[in-house]
Amino acid sequence: MSKHTMLLVVGFLVTAFFGGCQDRGNPSGNGRVPAGSYRYEGYDSKGNSIVVGTMSFSFVDSVSIRGEWALEKNGPSDNIGPQIGAGQLTGRVDDQVVSINLNPGWVDNNVVLQGSFENERLRGKWSWITFAGPTTEGTFDATKFN
C-alpha cells in the first residue's frame, strides 16, 4: 500500500471514529485537560503570527472531544490551509497529548493540531495535510479563558 493510500485510509478511519461518538457526558474535562474556551494563535514555521481566534470543546467521553472553532487570518502567510472561518472540531486526549482535527468529515485538506496542556495553556504543532501528505506546518498556543 502506498504512503498516499495509507494516509487516506488513516484519515478516513479517524474521521469515522470521531464522527460516530455519542455524547455520554463529561463536559468539564478528563482530569488532565480541562474543557472550555481557549484563545488561539497560530504561527508559521518562522514564528510569525498568522491566525487568531477562539476554539472551545467539551468531552464526549474520557478521551474524545468535540467542539467549535472560529479563526481569522492575522499575518502575511497564505499557505495555511483551511483554518480560516469557523467550523466544528473533533479530537482525542491520550494522557497529556491532545490531537484535534479542525476539519472532521473531510478526507483531504485537513488542519490537525497536536499539543500538550500545561498551566492553562495548550501548545503544540499544527499541520495542513492534503492527499500529498503534510503540506505546511507551524506552531500554536491556546490559552484557556472560560
Image: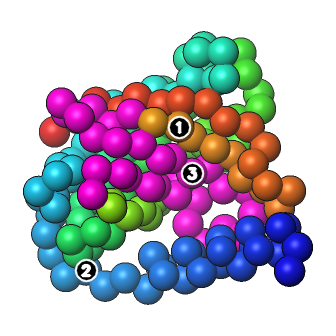
Residue 103 seen in the current view: yes
Instruction: Left or right? Give the position of 136 relative to 98.
Output: right
Q: Quadrant of residue 121?
A: top left
Cα–Cα gap, marks 2 and 3: 22 Å
Looking at the image, tell me whether mark 1 or mark 3 is earlier in sequence order: 3
**Residue 80 among those drawn in magenta:** no
Mark 2 or mark 3, which is nearer to you?
Answer: 3
User: For residue 23, which numbered disc appears in the image?
Assistant: 2
Kind of residue at badge 2: Asp
Kind of residue at badge 1: Lys
Q: Quadrant of residue 132?
A: bottom right
Looking at the image, tell me whether mark 1 or mark 2 is earlier in sequence order: 2
- Classed neighbour count for the residue bearing mark 3: other residues with Cα under 10 Å, few (<14), some (14–19), many (≥20): many
Disc 3 element: strand
- Classed neighbour count for the residue bearing mark 2: other residues with Cα under 10 Å, few (<14), some (14–19), many (≥20): some
* Tag count: 3
Above or below residue 10? Residue 116 is: above
The stretch in magenta equals 95-123
Give residue 66's position: percent from left, percent from top: 35, 64
Q: Which residue is mark 1?
A: 125
Disc 1 element: strand
Q: Write the residue at 76% across / 74% down.
A: 6
Instruction: Left or right? Give the position of 96 relative to 128.
Output: left
Mark 1 or mark 2, which is nearer to you?
Answer: 1
Marks 1 and 2 in Cβ contact (< 8 Å): no
Q: Write the residue at 71% across / 15% down.
A: 76
Q: Which residue is mark 3?
A: 112
- Taking depth in this image into account, of 130 and 146 the one nearest to the observer is 130
